[in-house]
Image (cartoon, rainbow, N blue to C red):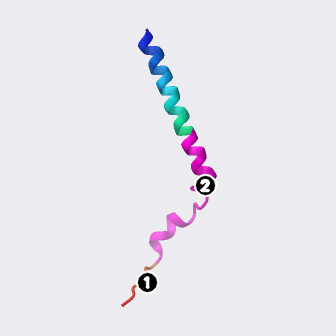
Amino acid sequence: MEVLFILIGVSFTVAVGFLVAFLISVKKGQFDDQETPAIRMLFDDDVKN
């Protein structure tokens, strides 16, 4: 039974860690541009000779 309480505590800590990482990435603008990554492969690369 004690192991169950330890696992609940560890899983809660991991979940909070992922939430904090997600909020930091949103605050830094990681998810701002949603158009360009989908169409980036359609653009021709400029080849310099």
Amino acid on which disc 2 is placed: Lys
Predominant secondary structure in magenta?
Answer: helix
Which residue is painted at 54% across and 67% down in the image?
A: 36
Asked if 37 appears above or below 3 in the picture, the reply is: below
Quarter of the figure with residue 35: bottom right
Crowding at dot 2, Cα within 10 Å, few <14 / some 14-19 / many 20+, comes out as few
Quarter of the figure with residue 28: bottom right
Crowding at dot 1, Cα within 10 Å, few <14 / some 14-19 / many 20+, comes out as few
Q: Position of residue 9 (x, y in %)?
A: 50, 22
Looking at the rendered structure, the secondary structure element under dot 1 is loop
Q: Quadrant of the N terminus?
A: top left
Indicate which disc, 1 or 2, sits on the residue closer to the N terminus: 2
Amino acid on which disc 1 is placed: Asp
Asked if 6 appears above or below 37 in the picture, the reply is: above
The answer to whether the residue labelled 1 contacts the one labelled 2, judged by CB atoms less than 8 Å apart, is: no
- The residue wearing badge 1 is 46
Q: Position of residue 48 (x, y in %)?
A: 39, 88
Q: Position of residue 8 (x, y in %)?
A: 49, 20
The reply to whether the magenta stretch includes residue 47 is no
Q: Quadrant of the C terminus?
A: bottom left
Q: Position of residue 4 (x, y in %)?
A: 44, 15
The reply to whether the magenta stretch includes residue 31 is yes
* Residue 22 vs residue 45, the one in the foreground: 22
Quarter of the figure with residue 41: bottom left
Which residue is painted at 44% across and 20% down in the image?
A: 7
* Residue 29 vs residue 38, the one in the foreground: 29
What residue range appears in magenta? 20-43
Which residue is painted at 45% across and 18% down in the image?
A: 6
**Residue 37: mark:** none
- The residue wearing badge 2 is 28
